[in-house]
Image (cartoon, grey):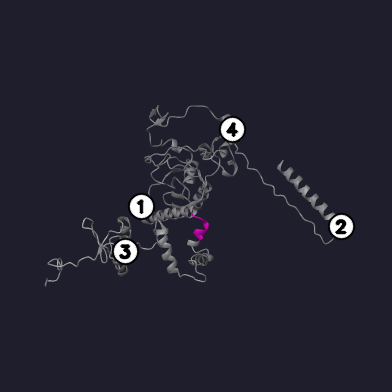
């Protein structure tokens, strides 16, 4: 159907072009060129196909995976270590991303989890599945307490480093054991594991048949662990895929710390505006010129230097109330009056009755404005006098001079 539709549309496009090319000949306008129209045919996303025949699925109760059945959580508990005989059986199926991936019902629901059976290659529902049938990407973010399949994590790893994992550590490295030793073991491991996402680093111990695969995204590591469990590479071996322990190498720890810093910086860079980030990183050559124009302080033709602009910016950023930066300093009441204040206070000297108090002026503690306000309130019966100079034995009190 798709090929037939594309053929019909191509035929329609060709017919339209021919008609446009014949019109100028009939009208005699040979200089006008015929316009060619092209239509872009977008293919719709294909639905996810069933990986196995639904008729072969048996409705049996799940096998016993522990020693005690917990009625509160409706699952088996205990038996943390995997059965050594079960681990020697090959997986029932294997996921093929190129053929099996497609849209399902979960694509219409935001925050849906990935299908565990799809990763293992045994999902029989196809596009009717309630989970995603595709690879995780960097934009698929989940709660740290669950994995990409929606299973709850625990505080500690299992004794055999299997299972879902721990929420106390962001683990992106898989331990792969039982690899068939060959000359091209590194190429074989990288070819099979890069199918499940972008790989950050691979380390292969050729003599022991062991590899450590580190993915860029945690969700891809969780998907690859289930997809490659009990699988085989180019030979008939059965892989033992587990979570890797913490690398004691100091270089590896520094590399992980540097990666976390880069990840945090990238998150901050995405949160800030693009223009501001470009100015900080020096990628905007016009930012410096624009900043000087905006910081001319209202003076035409004035270009402040970088030191003045930097000081002004820091002053505005460090103050909670920028409007008070340029406010004039106000004189408080308890201050020495100036010569002008003394002269103004002398003009208001009037005799006062003995019952009324006296307010010192001139060189006293109140300035002229305060004296004028008090005089208006008291009806002009305020006398200002100069403060007496201290005399007596208290002149040298507290002096460090030994002569006193």
Closer to the N terminus: mark 2 or mark 4? 2
Range shown magenta: 272-278
Residue 39, image x, y percentages: 72, 50
Q: Which mark is residue 53?
A: 4
Closer to the N terminus: mark 1 or mark 2? 2
Closer to the N terminus: mark 3 or mark 2? 2
Disc 3 versus disc 2: distance between alpha carbons?
Answer: 101 Å
Q: The C terminus lies in which quarter of the figure?
A: bottom left
Closer to the camera: disc 2 or disc 4? 2
Residue indicated by mark 3:
368
Residue indicated by mark 2:
25
Closer to the camera: disc 3 or disc 1? 3
Q: SS of the residue at dot 2?
A: helix
Q: Answer whether residue 191 is magenta in the image.
A: no
| Residue nearest the observer in this picture, 264 or 69 | 264
Asked which quadrant contains residue 99, the reply is top right
The residue lying at 52 percent from left, 57 percent from top is: 274
Q: The N terminus lies in which quarter of the figure?
A: top right
Residue indicated by mark 1:
248
Disc 4 versus disc 1: distance between alpha carbons?
Answer: 46 Å
Specify the farthest residue to the bottom.
403
Disc 3 versus disc 1: distance between alpha carbons?
Answer: 78 Å
Residue 153, image x, y percentages: 41, 39
């Amino acid at each position: 159907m798709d090929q037939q539709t594309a053929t019909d549309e191509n035929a329609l496009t060709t017919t339209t072009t021919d008609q446009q090319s014949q019109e100028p000949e009939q009208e005699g306008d040979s200089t006008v060129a015929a316009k060619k129209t092209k239509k872009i045919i977008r293919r719709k996303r294909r639905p996810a196909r069933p990986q196995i025949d639904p008729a072969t699925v048996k409705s049996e109760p799940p096998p016993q995976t522990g020693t005690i059945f917990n009625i509160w959580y409706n699952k088996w508990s205990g038996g943390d270590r995997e059965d050594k005989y079960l681990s020697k059986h090959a997986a029932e199926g294997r996921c093929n991303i190129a053929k099996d991936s497609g849209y399902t019902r979960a694509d219409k629901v935001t925050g849906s989890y990935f299908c565990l059976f799809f990763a293992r290659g045994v999902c029989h529902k196809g596009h009717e599945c309630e989970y995603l049938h595709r690879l995780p990407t960097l934009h698929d973010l989940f709660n740290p307490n669950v994995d990409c399949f929606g299973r709850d994590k625990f505080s500690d790893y299992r004794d055999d480093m299997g299972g879902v994992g721990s929420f106390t550590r962001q683990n992106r490295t898989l331990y792969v054991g039982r690899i068939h030793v060959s000359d091209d073991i590194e190429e074989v491991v990288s070819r099979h594991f890069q199918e499940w996402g972008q790989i950050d680093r691979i380390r292969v111990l050729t003599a022991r048949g062991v590899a450590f695969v580190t993915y860029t995204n945690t969700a891809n590591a969780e998907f690859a662990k289930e997809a490659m469990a009990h699988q085989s590479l180019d030979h008939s071996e059965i892989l033992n895929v587990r979570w890797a322990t913490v690398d004691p190498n100091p270089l590896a720890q520094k590399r992980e710390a540097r990666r976390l810093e880069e990840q945090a910086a990238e998150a901050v860079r995405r949160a800030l505006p693009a223009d501001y980030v470009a100015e900080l990183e020096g990628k905007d050559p016009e930012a410096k010129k624009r900043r000087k124009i905006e910081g001319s302080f209202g003076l035409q033709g004035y270009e402040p230097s970088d030191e003045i602009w930097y000081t002004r910016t820091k002053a505005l950023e460090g103050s909670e109330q920028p409007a008070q930066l340029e406010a004039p300093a106000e004189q408080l009441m308890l201050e020495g009056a100036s010569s002008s204040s003394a002269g103004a206070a002398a003009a208001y000297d009037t005799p006062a009755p003995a019952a009324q108090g006296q307010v010192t002026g001139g060189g006293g503690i109140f300035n002229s404005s305060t004296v004028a306000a008090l005089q208006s309130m008291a009806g002009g019966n305020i006398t200002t006098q100069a403060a007496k100079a201290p005399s007596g034995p208290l002149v040298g009190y507290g002096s460090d001079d030994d002569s006193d």
